[in-house]
């Protein structure tokens, strides 16, 4: 759900699904399913190059490098990625989220990886304090996403990490207050071929619909007279770290 309050009220709500994948277990999970593959075509597929730097370097190594650069100390704990898979070879993820744990199971950080429709990608790294569940974190906006949103804005995150349910809320504000609130809530289901087939039937070609939905909502905003902003250059750094 997105709810914009300024300069023109606008609301959208879509039903969708994501996969929650442990980066160390993707091969084992895909190997036990007929409808999901890794790095090859299938009804559903996960391709490593769709994420992080878009290279062949293992995703775990890339994420741990970002954690270390932020002054955190990854110790081999689980890193779980919430994302939409490719469907019939196509995917576009406006937001993918890495939940980074210590070996004792404590959540140490969340990495929010953002893609825009200009082919650019940037991530926000949110350190998590001990016992913070749900946790709150905030940082300045540095990456252009929507031509209908200015750059001089601030993000406030509230995240309830995956358990039986999941909730991610992001409030976008400027000097006058809240501009937009986005919420992603979900309920967990076991990852099986039957579950994949059901979501394919009930939400066919979801990843194409995401792109179509972005264009449709952009048209609605334009028709409402919401100003269009200039597309600035992306930030030089790959990751922005939120500081407590």
Image: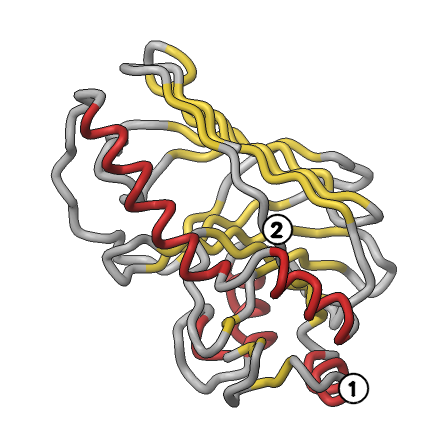
Comparing 122 with 49, the one in front is 49
Q: Is residue 176 above or below residue 62?
A: above
Circle number at residue 110 = 2
Q: Kindly indicate the quadrant of the structure image that contains residue 230.
A: top left
Q: Is mark 2 in CB contact (under 8 Å) with mark 1?
A: no
* Residue appearing at x 68%, y 38% in the figure: 167
- Mark 1, secondary structure of its residue: loop
Count of labels shown? 2
Comparing 65 with 80, the one in front is 80
Q: Which residue is mark 1?
A: 32
Instruction: Tell me how far mark 2 sits from mark 1, CA to CA.
Output: 28 Å
Query: Around disc 1, counting alpha carbons within 10 Å, would you say few (fewer than 14), some (14 to 19), or many (20 or more)?
Result: few
**Among all residues in the image, which is located at the extreme top?**
176
Q: Decide which of tag 2 and tag 1 comes sooner along the chain.
A: 1
Q: Is residue 71 above or below residue 39?
A: above
* Residue appearing at x 70%, y 83% in the figure: 30
Comparing 221 with 96, the one in front is 221
Place of residue 184 in the rendered image (x, y in percent of width and height, measured from the top left): 60, 39
Q: Is residue 225 above or below residue 119?
A: above
Location of the C terminus (image quadrant): top right
Circle number at residue 172 = none
Place of residue 219 in the rendered image (x, y in percent of width and height, measured from the top left): 23, 36
Q: Kindly indicate the quadrant of the structure image that contains residue 93.
A: bottom left
* Residue appearing at x 29%, y 60% in the figure: 120
């Amino acid at each position: 759900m997105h709810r914009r309050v300024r300069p023109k009220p606008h609301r959208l709500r879509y039903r969708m699904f994501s996969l929650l994948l442990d980066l160390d277990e993707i091969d084992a999970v895909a190997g036990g399913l007929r409808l999901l593959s890794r790095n090859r075509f299938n009804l559903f597929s996960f391709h490593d190059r769709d994420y992080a730097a878009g290279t062949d370097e293992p995703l775990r190594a890339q994420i741990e490098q970002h954690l270390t650069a932020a002054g955190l100390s990854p110790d081999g704990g689980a890193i779980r990625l919430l994302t939409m898979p490719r469907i019939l070879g196509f995917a576009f993820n406006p937001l993918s989220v890495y939940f980074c744990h210590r070996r004792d199971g404590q959540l140490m950080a969340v990495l929010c990886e953002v893609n825009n429709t200009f082919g650019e990608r940037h991530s926000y790294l949110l350190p998590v304090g001990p016992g913070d569940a749900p946790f709150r974190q905030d940082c300045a906006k540095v990456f252009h996403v929507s031509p209908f949103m200015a750059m001089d804005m601030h993000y406030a995150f509230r995240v309830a990490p995956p358990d039986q349910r999941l909730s991610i809320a992001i409030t976008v504000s400027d000097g006058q207050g809240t501009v937009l609130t986005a919420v992603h809530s979900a309920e967990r289901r076991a990852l099986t071929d039957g579950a994949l087939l059901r979501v394919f039937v009930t939400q066919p070609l979801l990843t194409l619909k995401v792109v179509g939905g972005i264009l449709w909502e952009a048209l609605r905003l334009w028709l409402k007279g919401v100003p269009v902003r200039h597309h600035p250059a992306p930030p030089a750094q790959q990751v922005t770290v939120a500081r407590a």
